[in-house]
Image (cartoon, rainbow, N blue to C red):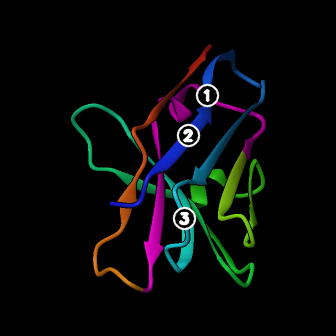
Amino acid sequence: QVPLVESGGGSVQAGGSLSLSCAVSGGYFSINVMGWYRQVLGNQRELVAKITKGGSTVYADSVKGRFTISRDGAKDMVWLQMNSLKPEDTAVYYCNAESTWYSSPFWGQGTQVTVSS
């Protein structure tokens, strides 16, 4: 199990900003892709954004132009800057890491983001 340590999140009014960070701890695990997913109770977990070690990014259409993912590849850290937040962004956000050594991805513990109207 790759330990992922998340921080950030919280509550904000619509139009506000929040940032999330995630770090791989405990050593080197040959991490290739890191990203953020979110889940609303009762719904499937969905991709928010992901970034490769080379810096290529993928965003969900719903967050394009509002969220920015960035990464420190040397330290296996990833950040998600969330601007112009909307109530529909309310969810538990999970950090995700894909290793070239393991077939299954790894998940953080999740952090709550709440956007009020």
Q: Is residue 97 above or below residue 68?
A: below
Q: Secondary structure at mark 2?
A: strand
Write the start and end of the magenta stretch as one range: 81-100
Per the image, the residue denoted by label 1 is: 9
In the rendered image, which quarter contains the N terminus? bottom left
Residue 74 sits in which quadrant? bottom right
- The total number of labels drawn is 3
Give the image location of residue 13, x and y in percent. 70, 15
Per the image, the residue denoted by label 3 is: 27
The amino acid type of the residue labelled 2 equals Glu
Mark 1, Cα crowd under 10 Å, few <14 / some 14-19 / many 20+, is many
Instruction: Please give the label number shown on residue 117.
Output: none
Give the image location of residue 47, x and y in percent. 46, 59
Mark 2, Cα crowd under 10 Å, few <14 / some 14-19 / many 20+, is many
Mark 3, Cα crowd under 10 Å, few <14 / some 14-19 / many 20+, is few
Q: Are marks 1 and 2 in contact (CB under 8 Å)?
A: yes
Which residue: 33% across, 50% down? 45
Which residue: 53% across, 43% down? 5
The magenta stretch spans residue 85: yes
Which residue: 28% across, 73% down? 104
3D distance between C-alphas at marks 2 and 3: 16 Å
Q: Secondary structure at mark 3?
A: loop
3D distance between C-alphas at marks 1 and 3: 25 Å
Residue 51 sits in which quadrant? bottom right
